Image (cartoon, rainbow, N blue to C red):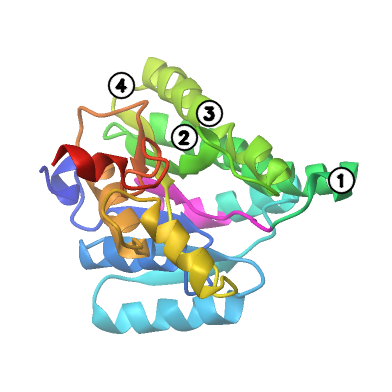
Amino acid sequence: MTSLSELYGTEQPVALITGAGSRRLGQVVARRLHREGCRVILHANTNFEQGKNVARELEQQGPEAEAFAADLRDADELDRFVNAASKKWGRVDILVHCAAIWYPQPLEEILPEDLDAFYAINQKASFLIAQKIGLQMTSQPSGGSIVLMGDWADARPYLHHASYFMSKGSIPMLTRVFAVELASRNPNVRVNAVLPGPVTLPKSLTETQYQAAVAGTLVHREGSPDDVAEAALGLIQNRFITGTCLPVDGGRTIYSGGDDYKQVK
């Protein structure tokens, strides 16, 4: 793989990671890119204090890090955040957009305002931040790389998450649209997506529910945010991949569970 410094023509590329305040996927991605030598911009909303603590911790270990607070549901606030983050080091080479909301709702209880809430962060914010950062990347000779976060289950949705899936199901199309649009302006800008599977299963699951989720994978185990971070890094480093949506799901997209596959071993 090409090193990030080679790809972007700078010793310490700048990576912006949204949803990096809480101890979940975004923060794991930020730590992984920091280990690769990136200066990192950590976006947080409700967990901003924790985001600042992580930024201070990372700075003690190597390249610079900075935390910014923004509610990405607010278009004006998103705009201010993007402008401030871009000015910090004068460039953004990598964007990994992890900010999202997810919670169950029976179909009968979904209201128009619930749809608005899911669309605002999972769909609209994804579009706007990819648009604004992506167009900035087109002005950089070395371009840049954007990785969006979708969901494996846009192919096989499960119950009680209709609002969520309607919003996250837009990510594959956003990925392809922005890959085409941005490359037409600068072929060094690439856009891909990772579609995580069971990597952060809710702690509220019963043991039976947990085992069923694990049995639904071909590898018969839960994944981890590190698996997703490594996949994102691979897409970022490979200069010949764009417009791709990569499931990181232990085979969950193509396998519905059960023991059928064992019979052919």
196 horizontally vs 59: left or right: right
Taking the magenta stretch, the answer to whether it contains residue 102 is yes
Question: Which residue, given by chain and number where applicable, does mark 1 sit on?
Answer: 108
Question: Which residue, given by chain and number where applicable, does mark 3 sit on?
Answer: 174
The image position of residue 78, as x and y in percent, is 66, 50
Q: Are marks 2 and 3 in contact (CB under 8 Å)?
A: no
Residue 187: which disc?
Answer: 4
Sequence-wise, the earlier of marks 1 and 2 is 1
Asked whether the viewer can see residue 151, the reply is yes
Mark 3 Cα within 10 Å, few/some/many (few <14, many 20+)? many
106 horizontally vs 246: left or right: right
Of circles 2 and 3, the one toward us is 3
Q: Residue furthest top?
A: 184
Sequence-wise, the earlier of marks 4 and 3 is 3
**Res. 15 image quadrant:** bottom left
Real-space Cα separation, disc 4 to disc 3, in angstroms = 17 Å
Real-space Cα separation, disc 3 to disc 1, in angstroms = 29 Å
Residues shaded magenta: 84-103
Q: Are marks 4 and 3 in contact (CB under 8 Å)?
A: no
The image position of residue 24, as x and y in percent, is 47, 68
Q: Is residue 183 above or below residue 120?
A: above
Of circles 4 and 1, the one toward us is 1
Numbered disc 3: secondary structure: helix
Q: Amino acid at mark 2?
A: Gly
Asked whether the viewer can see residue 139, the reply is no
Residue 134: which disc?
Answer: 2
Sequence-wise, the earlier of marks 2 and 3 is 2
- Residue sitting at 37 percent across and 67 percent down? 28
**Res. 188 image quadrant:** top left
